[in-house]
Image (cartoon, rainbow, N blue to C red):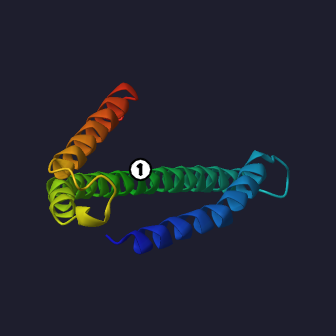
Amino acid sequence: MPTGKLGDIRQAVIKMRRFINPQREAISMLATLENWIIAPDELALLRETANRTRRIVEELDATRDRLSALRDHIDADRAHALSRNSYVLSVVAAIFLPLGFLTGLFGVNVAGMPGTTAPSAFWVLAGVSAVGGLALFLIFKFAKWL
């Protein structure tokens, strides 16, 4: 059931309860009257009607609660699906981020950087990147982000 339709049904139940509950109270008050205007058999019918309207209000309350529980279940299912999709995205990122790093590392033009006259300039750049990555890993590990 689409959530829009679920919301519409819940709103209709709430409106019906708002309409029926005052009638229940009025009928209950009439059923407690014992005077010469209302005959005893009519009082019995009023009491029965008051009981029926009380059960209707209780059923409307139960229906509203069931609809709320159903809505919570749908929200939990959506949150689970979102969590699963986020996990898949994280796995894809974990695969492609190192590849992007390697592409950037091998595509760097060290000729315009200071200290590139040394033949080990590329290896110094790679080592500094590895140390930076290890430092970030340790920071994330101690911060309990991993």
Q: Is residue 39 visible?
A: no
Task: Please tell me which residue is depicted at 23% across the width and 58% down the height of the picture.
Answer: 89
Quadrant hosting residue 105: bottom left
Identify which residue, 1 or 47, lies in the foreground.
Answer: 1
Identify which residue, 10 or 60, lies in the foreground.
Answer: 10
Count residues near mark 1 (Cα–Cα under 10 Å), then give few for <14, some for 14-19, many for 20+.
few
The residue to which callout 1 is attached is 69
Task: Please tell me which residue is depicted at 54% across the width and 49% down the height of the picture.
Answer: 58
Task: Please tell me which residue is depicted at 35% across the width and 72% down the height of the picture.
Answer: 2
Instruction: Classify the position of the C terminus by image quarter.
Output: top left
User: Most extreme residue toward the right, as rendered?
Assistant: 36
Whether residue 92 sits left or right of residue 11 in the image: it is: left
Position of residue 36 measured from the top left corner of the image (x, y, whole percent): 85, 53
Q: SS of the residue at dot 1?
A: helix
Whether residue 94 sits left or right of residue 37 in the image: it is: left
The answer to whether 143 is drawn above or below residue 101 in the figure is above
